[in-house]
Image (cartoon, grey):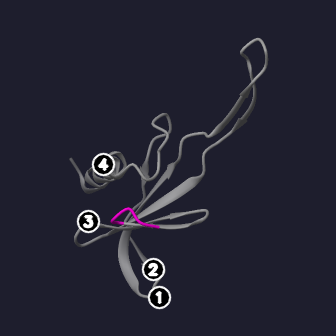
Amino acid sequence: MNIKEQIIEKLKIWLVKTDVISYDERIPLNCWDKELDELRDGTTKEVYIVSFNTKSTNVEYNEKGEVISFFEGMSCFAYFDAETLELLYIMKKAGYIEADGSY
């Protein structure tokens, strides 16, 4: 298993274990190449970023059971330290989720 696959597996396990945010299993998690990025605390560090979508939260059906309205889940980005492969935080539309699961 290569590094990107390891990171994706770590994220999947973390998501299930903490249960603080969902992910849509139908949309593959995408791990980007290692890059030098400025973190939210202003430091610059080599990181791997994994993009994923949360589960769709708003599906409306008509009286026949057909989907009439569908809103996709939000895009999120998980930041992993490139040296330790530890989760640093998850960035989402409405803020951040810490590695311990807190907001």
The boundaries of the magenta stretch are 99-103
Answer with mark 1 or mark 4, whichever residue precedes in sequence.
Answer: 4
Which label lies toward us, 4 or 2? 4
| Labels 3 & 2 near each other (Cβ < 8 A) | no
Which badge, 4 or 2, comes first in the chain's sequence?
A: 4
Q: Which residue is mark 4?
A: 17
Residue pointed to by mark 1: 42
Q: Nearer the viewer, residue 49 or 72?
A: 72
**Crowd band around label 2 with a 10 angstrom C-alpha radius: few (<14), some (14–19), many (20+):** some
Which residue in the structure is indicated by mark 2? 39
Cα distance in 3D space between marks 1 and 2: 5 Å
**Can you identify the residue that label 3 sits on?**
85
**Spatial CA span between label 3 and label 4:** 17 Å
Name which of mark 3 and mark 4 comes first in the sequence.
4
Which circle, 1 or 4, is nearer the viewer? 4
First reached walking from the N terminus: tag 3 or tag 1: 1
Q: Are marks 3 and 1 in contact (CB under 8 Å)?
A: no
Q: Alpha-carbon neighbours of circle 4 within 10 Å: few (<14), some, or many (≥20)?
A: few
State the CA–CA distance, disc 3 to disc 2. Answer: 15 Å
